[in-house]
């Protein structure tokens, strides 16, 4: 019963991944608004005119429109990244399916090829977070190579294996051309993900919206106190919750390759690739484990 109640509460009021920073920010705004109200009530000779409070509400609406644009741009980056990893899953499956059907290699070669495809996905995940050497990729712990770009190295090995099969006469030129698009897609996905990671939303957009949000929250309590009195504190906090929450969420979402709750579940995608490749090629490889949490 208790578990059901907890699940119902989480479904009705899901927690925000940015709640720690958001709650602290809203608390600071509440304390600042209280100080402003005390100053206006006790030290100022006259309250500001009521129309200023109305203008503050209009400014909040305009600022909300700009933040909506910011949020949409961040989500488009997240969604593009999700489509790229979906493409990687599909191309990995198709590559293994065609290898099993056209090449029909022995078990050892099947296992080595599956290790390459799965290793590429794991290497790409780590490359997009914190670059790590080839030896950290499952199945390559004793490999002597020290490539700078691990995903490119593993994608190159995939092409080398296809060339070996072609030279050995196991696949024809037409069959090689049928395999090539899926092998080439590995680095296409890698390059597109690198573009997303290295091209954040332009600084001017982020700086302008943050300046506008901070200036508005600094000025809104002074304006609204004339119209709403102490109720202005609650109103300003409510607006701060949504304005700051949108900005903090957009900041999380625009970089989708991390390990925050808003980021893509890259380990799950890698495990999906492992299950598909091992099933298609008829081999066994250990599950893809989540990366250890780095020490703070």
Image (cartoon, grey):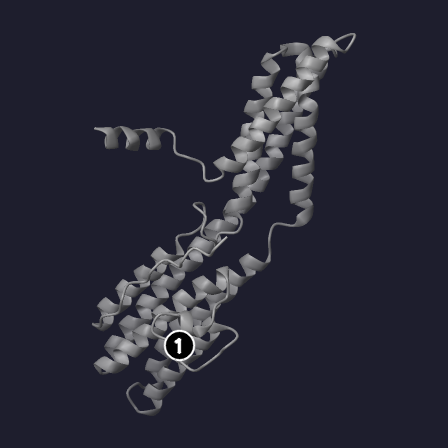
Residue 50 coordinates in the image, percent (x, y)? 70, 11
The answer to whether residue 104 is visible is no
Tell me which corner region of the image, top left, top right, bottom left or bottom right, holds residue 195. Answer: bottom right
Residue at the (24%, 73%) spot, across then down = 281
Residue 226 coordinates in the image, percent (x, y)? 69, 11
Q: Residue furthest bottom?
A: 168
At mark 1, the secondary structure is helix
Viewer-side residue, 7 vs 279: 7
Tell me which corner region of the image, top left, top right, bottom left or bottom right, holds residue 283. Answer: bottom left
Residue 139 coordinates in the image, percent (x, y)? 34, 74
Residue at the (46%, 71%) spot, across then down = 151
* 199 up-or-down from 140: above or below: above
Viewer-side residue, 205 vs 17: 17
As drawn, is 220 to the left or to the right of 135? right
As drawn, is 200 to the left or to the right of 4? right
* 77 up-or-down from 238: above or below: below
Tell me which corner region of the image, top left, top right, bottom left or bottom right, holds residue 236. Answer: top right
Residue at the (60%, 28%) spot, across then down = 28
Residue 240 coordinates in the image, percent (x, y)? 58, 28
- Mark 1 = which residue? 180
* 7 up-or-down from 233: above or below: below
The answer to whether residue 166 is visible is yes
């Amino acid at each position: 019963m208790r578990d059901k109640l907890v699940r119902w509460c989480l479904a009705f009021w899901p927690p925000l991944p940015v709640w720690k920073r958001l709650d602290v920010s809203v608390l600071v705004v509440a304390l600042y608004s209280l100080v402003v109200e005390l100053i206006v009530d006790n030290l100022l000779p006259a309250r500001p005119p009521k129309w200023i409070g109305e203008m503050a509400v209009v400014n909040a609406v305009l600022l909300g429109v700009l933040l909506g644009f910011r949020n949409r741009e961040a989500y488009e980056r997240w969604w593009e990244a999700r489509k790229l990893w979906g493409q990687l899953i599909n191309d990995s499956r198709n590559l293994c399916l065609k290898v099993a059907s056209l090449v029909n290699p022995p078990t050892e070669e099947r296992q080595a090829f599956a290790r390459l495809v799965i290793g590429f996905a794991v290497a790409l995940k780590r490359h997009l977070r914190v670059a790590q050497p080839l030896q950290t990729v499952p199945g390559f712990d004793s490999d002597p190579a020290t490539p700078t770009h691990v995903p490119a190295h593993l994608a190159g090995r995939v092409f080398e294996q296809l060339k070996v099969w072609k030279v050995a006469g196991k696949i024809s030129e037409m069959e090689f051309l049928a395999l090539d698009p899926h092998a080439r897609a590995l680095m296409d996905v890698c390059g597109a993900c690198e573009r997303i990671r290295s091209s954040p939303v332009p600084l001017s957009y982020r700086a302008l919206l943050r300046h506008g949000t901070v200036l508005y929250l600094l000025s809104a309590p002074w304006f609204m106190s004339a119209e709403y009195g102490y109720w202005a504190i609650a109103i300003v906090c409510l607006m701060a919750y949504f304005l700051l929450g949108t900005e903090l969420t957009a900041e999380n979402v625009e970089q989708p390759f991390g390990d925050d709750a808003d980021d893509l579940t890259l380990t799950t995608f890698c495990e999906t690739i492992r299950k598909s490749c091992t099933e298609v090629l008829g081999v066994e490889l250990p599950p893809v484990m989540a990366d250890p949490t780095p020490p703070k």
